[in-house]
Every structure is written in C-alpha cells, then in structure tokens.
Image (cartoon, helix red, strand yellow):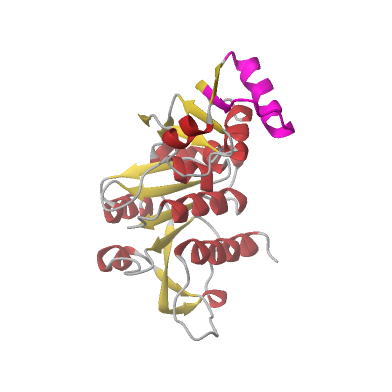
Amino acid sequence: MSYEEFTIEGRNAVTEAFRAGRTIDKLYVLDGCQDGPVLTIKREAAKQGTIIKYVKRERLDQMSETGKHQGVIAVAAAYGYAEVEDILAAAEKKGEPPFVILLDNIEDPHNLGAIIRTANLAGAHGVIIPKNHAVGLTATVAKTSAGALNYTPVARVTNLARTIEDLKKRGLWFVCAHMEGTLMYELDLKGPVGLVIGSEGEGVSRLVREKCDMTAAIPMRGSIDSLNASVAAGVLSYEILRQRLNL
C-alpha cells in the first residue's frame, strides 16, 4: 500500500476510524466539550493510547479542510491505497464473484466519498480510481464516506482502460453508465462485474467506454437529462445487488 497522511474530521468519521482499528497519532478535541459522542471518542482514544490535545475552536477551524469538524479532528497514520489484487482477494475471501466500482475522472471529493459509502453498503468489494484527473483520498472524502473508507479498499491505477483489460482476463465483465445505453433492468448484471461511472460533465471517456462490454441507462422522467455521479453509482449498484439477491 502507498500512504497519504491527512486528518479525519467529524464525530462519525473519527468514531468509525477508531472502531476499525486505524492508528490515530493525535486527537484534537474542542476544549470544554463534554457531550456523549465526544466522550465516546475520547474513551476509544484512551484504549489506543492516542495523545489527546484540547484546543480552542479557532485552532480546529485552522486545521479543518472540510469546515465541519464538529469539535474533533484526528490525525491518522494514513489511509492506504489498496492494490487491485486486494479487492479481488476480498471477494474471494467472501466466496462471492467480484463486484468492483471504477470511477473515471471523478474530481469532486464529496462524490467520491458518497460512492465509497454506497460501495460498502451495496456489497462492492472495492473501488478503483485513476491517478490523474481525479480526486484522491482526502479528508473530505473520508468524512463524506461516513466511515466506509475504513472497510472498503480503494485502489489507484495509472491507466483505467488497461486495468479493465487486465480484469477482463480475470473473468470480469464491465458495464458503464451511459444515457444512450440499454435500460439497466434489461441487462444481466450478475456474476463478476465492474461498474464504471464517469464524471457529471463528460461521463465515461470514450477510450474507457469502448473497453466496456455493456452500457446501462437509468430510466429518468424529469426535465433534466443527468444524475449526480454518486446518485447514478448508487442506482446502478443497487440494481447489481438486486440481481445478485435474485429479487
């Protein structure tokens, strides 16, 4: 794994980080804050032997990248990028066909965090993002994921199209979200599958789309013609889950 050290902000995100066993170097707490959630975080910090520093709100505001620290900021040892092999191994360990979400040019950290959260809840074994023209694992991503980043591996690759080619050799089929694709309910999305989601503005790039086996359209009845990337990922992920559960 490669590592990027950064802060974890917000009570839910910090609590989940401790519960997942992540190493926290320091915990910054708003001086005088004694409510229940913060006391729980402090107990978890004490169990791990984490240094607790009590600071003024101005200090937390200066440290915060999200502007929503809720009185607690943890300095984590780091979130690590997994390898693609780690994602496949997670599927094998569960005895399930791989379900991977691949993101093409997602630059909004809120979208990435929300997709990681959805990936965890929908049973995806991991998320793959490109190194270039895409957001990485920032504090905002960690907070938006609501703790899911502690449980869902995220791999970062140099070339998304080449990664798809490599995974095809491992038996995966790929479907990408596209407005002009086949209605998602008409597609067989069971088995080892990779779901490709593009950015809101440009969608999935042509080169990546051409590597996919299918394109899936989400039915829409409104006056606009596109969904937020994280919402599209959620709708298609749950269609994959529905088919896997034979519902």
Decide which of 166, 38 is in the foreground and name it. 38
Near-viewer residue (196 or 246): 196
Residue 186 position, x and y percent, is: 54, 77
Q: Does the magenta stretch include residue 36?
A: yes
Q: Which residue is at the far top? A: 49
Left or right of residue 45: residue 149 = left
| Segment tinted magenta in the rendering | 27-49
Q: In this view, does 206 lie above or below 21?
A: below
Q: Which residue is drawn at 47% across and 67% down?
A: 228
Please name the residue shown 67% across and 30% down the image: 38
Instruction: Classify the position of the N terminus by image quarter.
Output: top left
Residue 100 x, y percent position in the rendering: 47, 52
**Residue 23 visible in the displayed image:** no
> Residue 174 appears in which quarter of the rendering?
bottom left
Locate the C terminus and report the quarter of the image it occupies. bottom right
In the displayed structure, 1 sits above or below 69; it is above
Q: In this view, does 245 lie to the left or right of 193?
A: right
- Name the residue: 51% across, 28% down: 74
Q: Where is residue 75 in the image (x, y as percent from the top left)?
A: 47, 26
Please indicate whether residue 212 sits to the left or right of residue 11 in the image. Answer: left
Q: Nearer the viewer, residue 123 or 134?
A: 134
Q: Would you say residue 103 is visible in this rendering?
A: yes
Q: Does the magenta stretch include residue 63?
A: no
Left or right, 242 with reference to 77: right
Viewer-closest of 240 and 131:
131
Q: Residue 49 location, x and y as percent?
A: 59, 13
